[in-house]
Amino acid sequence: MALDAKSDAAIGLLVDLIALALGTIALAAVTWVDFRLGLSLLVTAVTYFGVLLLCCWGSFHALCFICLIAAGSLNYFFIPPIFSFRISHTQDIIAVVAFLITSLIVARLLTLGHLR
């Protein structure tokens, strides 16, 4: 019985690591394509939600980490001043915080749906 619990925990950890790896690779690819095409902050944020859907089989903690990476990428690559984590306009702070809150809610709903 204890062996089954340990193997289930190991499998769960492996699934989370795979979800993190795939999510990070997908975020990097989406960020690169959106940045090279000069797409807006809104379009990139919507495509980041697609990445969350791709990783929906991971745990809530893995999706939270992906949400943090996505919010940081939005800030670094798409909000002026570009290539800096500094935000110069108040509306951009609100946009990043709104994206982060919305993505965390979506992540929670995805994991709740996955558990059912």
Image (cartoon, rainbow, N blue to C red):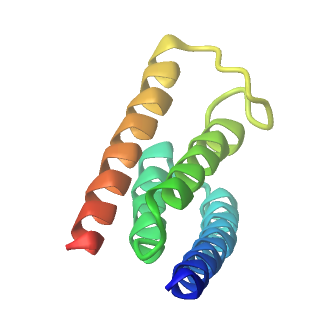
Extreme residue toward the right, this view: 83
Q: Residue at x 48, y 59 (%)?
A: 48
Q: Looking at the image, how many numbered discs can be counted on the residues? A: 0
Q: Residue at x 40, y 45 (%)?
A: 104
The picture quadrant where one finds residue 7 is bottom right
**Residue 107: percent from left, percent from top:** 37, 55
Q: Between 112 and 54, which is closer to the camera in this rendering?
A: 112
**Residue 76: percent from left, percent from top:** 71, 39
Q: Is residue 4 left or right of residue 32?
A: left
Residue 57's place in the image compared with 108, above or below, is: below
Q: Between 24 and 112, which is closer to the camera in this rendering?
A: 112
Residue 84's place in the image compared with 106, above or below, is: above
Quadrant the C terminus occupies: bottom left
Q: Between 27 and 90, which is closer to the camera in this rendering?
A: 27
**Residue 33: percent from left, percent from top:** 64, 68
Q: Residue at x 26, y 56 (%)?
A: 109
Q: Residue at x 50, y 48 (%)?
A: 40
The picture quadrant where one finds residue 16 is bottom right
Q: Between 57 and 70, which is closer to the camera in this rendering?
A: 57
Extreme residue toward the front, this view: 1
Residue 16's place in the image compared with 61, above or below, is: below
**Residue 61: percent from left, percent from top:** 52, 54
